[in-house]
Image (spheres, rainbow, N blue to C red):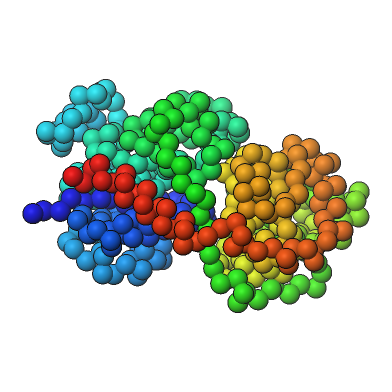
Amino acid sequence: MTKKKVAIILPSAHSGGVWDYAKYMTERLIDVYSSNPNFEIVVAILDHVANQNKFSEILEKFPRVLTHPGSVRAIKLKNVDLAFINQLSAGIKSNSLIDKKYTLFDDGFTFLLDCSFWFLLSLQDGYEIPPIVPFCSIPHDTIPRHVPEIFGCDFSSGYWGIFLENIRTIQNAEFMISINPETDDDYVGYFGVRRNKIINLPLFLPLKNFQKVTAYVSNKPYFIWVTNCTLHKNQARTLQALQLYYTKCCGCFEVFIISGDAVRWESMFLMQYKNSGWRENVHLLDFVTEKEFLEYIKGAKFVLHSVLNDNGTSVAIEAKIMGIPTLSSDYKQMHFLNESLGLNMSFFDPMDIEDMAKKIKLMEWYDYQKENKYDFTKFYNEEEVKKLYKKKLAQLLSRYLR
């Protein structure tokens, strides 16, 4: 008897939390397989990412699972019309589709149509993914609802065009997974999905051996600002707040900016301050390894999380475990993390430059000794979370593997 297949479609251009969650979900799905191998797992990743280390991270973990023919596939996004879908999916219901452009996953084999279910672990660039195979969608945030300016003013093309197609993909999903209940109302009100499609799973954290992390040693005390080039990260206001901190508040701490792309970040945001005297306190870092990243955090006085809106950050949790506090933008997803995990964060208004500068200054007098008393295990049981994921995912898959 031929076993049914479940496809895990990995992210394309993401890193950080999105990639960590994709790996975690892959591990939990393989847990389901290991207990009841009545189906086969197919791991699919875009071909331009397939040669990167990210692909081998998955394959090296599960060599005995991903051994059947076609279990690992490099895919391309292929834009097609309705006629192509009707020809490709003969016998598969597609009469609900309208005549427009769609995007499929071209694996050079079956367009993943030999799979009974897809786990779409992040949204892709392109057109709407049609529901010709039932799938799960994991939208990682609803940032454009709260920060629409990140996509510009052209609502018919560019990022807005991609995002509108992504909304249609989300609406086509059989269900969607949420790990932060504060975003559920956005999924319903903004994406237009029924609430009974939302599957709530607990927060996860890819725990590391923090005891072995060695603190980065700097000549002066410093704090870390983790950011990137996307405009919801509030770069302009944060730099203005730093200018106030150093020039008006007599700031004593240096700042290390972990940007992921130092050349682009400097040209977009920092170049205008190149002749400012306070600029000598600012150190812009390019890509850092995970080991270096944790070392910078452990050596810091605190972590600055400045965004206009986001889906939270695991950096605040990792920092807390190592005894480092976080000063965060005031938004509901971070309050959820703060309350559910006892992080004891401080908050500022991300739109108020003076408030941000003053709160950064106040961190110079923070009682850092109390951070060492934090016991993460009181709030998070890793094995229980794994068991719950496994149980829930097994229940969901059982509908499609009969």
The residue shown at (63%, 53%) is 341
Q: Nearer the viewer, residue 207 or 341?
A: 341
> The C terminus appears in which quarter of the rendering?
top left
* 399 lies left or right of 91: right
The quarter of the displayed image where residue 134 is located: top left
Residue 279: where, in percent of width, then height? 80, 57
Q: Nearer the viewer, residue 217 or 286?
A: 217
Q: Looking at the image, can residue 187 be seen?
A: yes
> The N terminus appears in which quarter of the rendering?
bottom left
The residue shown at (32%, 44%) is 396
The quarter of the displayed image where residue 166 is located: top left
* 187 lies left or right of 256: left
Residue 390: where, in percent of width, then height? 37, 54
Instruction: Using the image, determine if residue 68 lies above or below residue 362.
Output: below
Residue 216: where, in percent of width, then height? 69, 73
Residue 168: where, in percent of width, then height? 38, 30
Instruction: Using the image, determine if residue 100 lies above or below residue 15.
Output: above
* 181 lies left or right of 138: right
Instruction: Using the image, determine if residue 175 lies above or below residue 60.
Output: above
